[in-house]
Amino acid sequence: MAVTRDIFHDPVLATEIVAFLATKPGIYVDGTLGGGGHSLAMLRALFDAGFLDGSLLIGIDQDESALSEASEKLREYEARTVLVKGNFVDIGSIITRVSSEKGLRPKVAGILLDLGVSSFQIDTAERGFSYMREGPLDMRMDRSSSVSASDIVNTYEERELAKLFYIYGEEPRSRSIARAIIAYRQKNGSVGSTQELADIIRRNAHGGERVIKTLSRVFQALRIEVNAELDVLRQALDDGIDCLDEHGRMAVITYHSLEDRIVKRFFAEKARSDWGPKGVGLREPLAWGSVIPVTRKPLTATQQEIGVNSRARSAKLRVIEKIYHGGCSGCS
Ligand SMILES: C[S@@+](CC[C@H](N)C(=O)[O-])C[C@H]1O[C@@H](n2cnc3c(N)ncnc32)[C@H](O)[C@@H]1O
């Protein structure tokens, strides 16, 4: 399927997502709807294959602007989509509620998580995600949530800031940047904008290319903290796998090593059967693994895709499939 360019968000690895997920009729969940690029590609593929009548797409996003953009884009498939403002951490209860409203079994054929922020969010200065644009220190994907980047930058103690930049940004100069922020706060009262913060970082980073890396790492760390990105991811993976029907698939696209490590470990853990203590020699495991890997190694974008969509450069796609061992796949 040809992937078309989109000013809101070019869907990354869209051809692969369609090939792995949209293979049969069923309920599909796009947990990171964004501008609806992946959802549209999946709905079109389901239509082309004659599966649309038996399918429903549940699109979830915590950002109102994403939902309004996506609802426009998916208008022709309105009858086959339900868009929900919410956090994918609640994927289990959202699936249960929407399926019950539609009279469907709460078991899904496919789940997609395309993590992080959209190009639209980054490019909108007043959202405060970018060190390249002057804006408020906000970074909330869900603008009804109470904690913004400003609260963190202006209230965390030096040690907390340093830990945050080190753990969520993997930034080697975490301590000196945290120290510089505290000194700035003491002198000026508070850090007021993305550019004020970027200038503090620039003054404390090594020169050249490393400045850009440090800026990205510190901004990434703040974004992860503001949106509790890694905590919600673990929970969503667990609950999402529970909701998959037999042979249902989950596809996750990550953009940095912290996310990818969580997904990789989680999928490996779910695939492993429990053979009890070593040397017992059981004929069957105490518990079978509940998934099998569909992608042995993470898939990455082609040079051609990266050429038209630079965001695809760091993308890694992992896919698993749910298996049932003699249990009842219809039981919820
Ligand atoms: C990378 S973009 C997805 C783009 C989308 N795949 C497309 O084709 O347009 C990520 C989207 O997920 C949303 N998002 C991130 N974390 C979320 C979460 N925990 N719950 C709900 N939405 C989330 C963001 O608001 C953003 O719109």
Image (spheres, grey):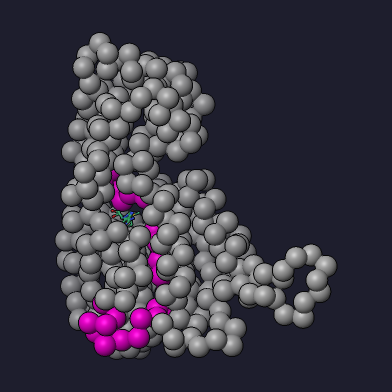
Vertical placement of 145 versus 41: above or below? above
Stretch in magenta: 98-122
Q: Is residue 108 magenta?
A: yes
Q: Looking at this view, is 206 or 258 the one in front?
A: 258
Q: Looking at this view, is 85 or 71 the one in front?
A: 85
Vertical placement of 323 versus 126: above or below? below
Residue at (32% x, 46% y) in the render:
227
Q: Position of residue 154 (x, y in %)?
A: 27, 26
Vertical placement of 205 versus 301: above or below? above
Q: Position of residue 243 (x, y in %)?
A: 42, 75
- Looking at the rendering, which quadrant does residue 155 occupy? top left
Q: Report the quarter where the N terminus lies.
A: bottom left
Can residue 43 be spotted in the picture?
Answer: no
Q: Position of residue 198 (x, y in %)?
A: 32, 25
Q: Report the quarter where the C terminus lies.
A: bottom left
Residue at (22% x, 14% y) in the render:
188
Image quarter for ligand 1: bottom left
- Looking at the rendering, which quadrant does residue 69 occupy? bottom left
Can residue 277 be spotted in the picture?
Answer: yes
Q: Position of residue 135 (x, y in %)?
A: 20, 32
Q: Is residue 147 magenta?
A: no
- Looking at the rendering, which quadrant does residue 137 occupy? top left
